[in-house]
Amino acid sequence: MNKTKQLLNSSLLTIITGCLALMSGACSSEKEEPAATTSGSVPKIIVMYGPGGLGDQGYMDCILSGVQKFKRTHHSDVDMYQYSPSSMDEAERLVNDWLSLPPSEVPALFLVASSDYETIITESLSRYSLTENKRMLMFENDINLDLPITIFRISMFGASYLAGATAAHYVMSLGEDSGTKDALVLLAHPNDKTIANSGAGFKAGFDSAGPDAVVHTEYLADDWTGYVSAQAAYQRMGDWSKSFAFVFPVAGGSNHGIFRYTREHPDSPMTAGMDIDQSDLSRNIMGSVVKHIDRVVFDYMETWLSTGELPESAVFGLDSGYVDWVLSPRYAQYQSIVNAAREEAIRKEVAEL
């Protein structure tokens, strides 16, 4: 763990070049060897995680798990460098410094592990060209962007549709004296198409069941900080718990503010886990939208290492096996609802893509 923290706080490009002080800070590789002693012909993989995202016990940590598994599997075949920028400016410097490095015969793959970097990547690639042996893989963005890179996106529409259907049947089971039956979709910020897609899927699934209730949408912030605002989410739950019977949070690490509130207040709304199975974090979590992003990342890196190329850009939905709605064990009685809605969820998702 200490070695990983040391790596994430280091200056990535000093490691890559071995001699250029492109960014300040102490540096080390996962092998903890000086750059001069590593093989110059070993392929390089650079991973840039989302700003402040590691430690979210969800999406970013799942990516880290896939990266670490790949590193263990190919520890002698590739040099791996991981970086977690603390700001967008820091991320932009990292990308530009890497793109501006002189051409090399050594293959290099840069993983852009957050949709929040779309503007940075677009602007940087308008100034610099990818040299022959450089490849870039960008996560969770529009695959139709006119960029010379590979992009993948995991659509959460279908899995979220199943979550919405589950939530609708739950609120319909509430008595007339239970108060509100409305649901809330909580998104980190309004500019992320991937999470907006998830919110739309939840609403479609909820509405399909025909409850006498409405789905509302709110945002935690105007930018990426909505992913790291757990305390703000916790504080706002005081009001949301009075207005909603179900809260569907798609806000990264901020979701933990929701889960904490539900643990501390037994009469809280029901909610959903996100990215990994989070059923152990609160009794109010009815299920989780599970994204096997670790497997996606591993498979892409495996293909690149063996062929030198990346597959074409792609969108993975409910029928891919990379994403699903997984009920918490204590709410297994809703499994028949999920099974009945699955085919329609896939059909609706395909129509959305």
Image: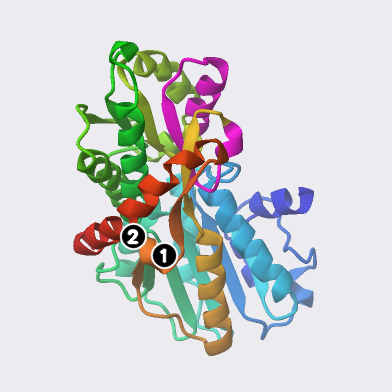
Residues at badges 1 and 2 in contact (C-beta under 8 Å)? yes
The quadrant the C terminus occupies is: bottom left
* Residue at mark 1: 138
**Residue shown at 35% from the left, 19% from the top:** 240
Using the rendered view, name the quadrant where residue 127 is placed: bottom left
Position of residue 115 relative to residue 137, above or below, is above
Q: Tell me the crowding category of disc 1: few under 14, some 14 to 19, or many 20 or more residues within 10 angstroms, Cα based.
A: many
Position of residue 69 relative to residue 158, above or below, is below
Using the rendered view, name the quadrant where residue 11 is placed: bottom right
* Residue at mark 2: 141
Q: Tell me the crowding category of disc 2: few under 14, some 14 to 19, or many 20 or more residues within 10 angstroms, Cα based.
A: many
**Residue shown at 19% from the left, 27% from the top:** 212
Q: Position of residue 122 (x, y in %)?
A: 31, 62
In front here: 159 or 126?
159
Task: Check disc 1 and give the amino acid type.
Answer: Met
**Residue shown at 55% from the left, 77% from the top:** 108
Q: Is residue 296 magenta?
A: no
Question: In the image, which residues are magenta?
Answer: 256-281
Q: Position of residue 134 (x, y in %)?
A: 48, 79
Q: Secondary structure at mark 1?
A: strand
Q: Is residue 276 magenta?
A: yes
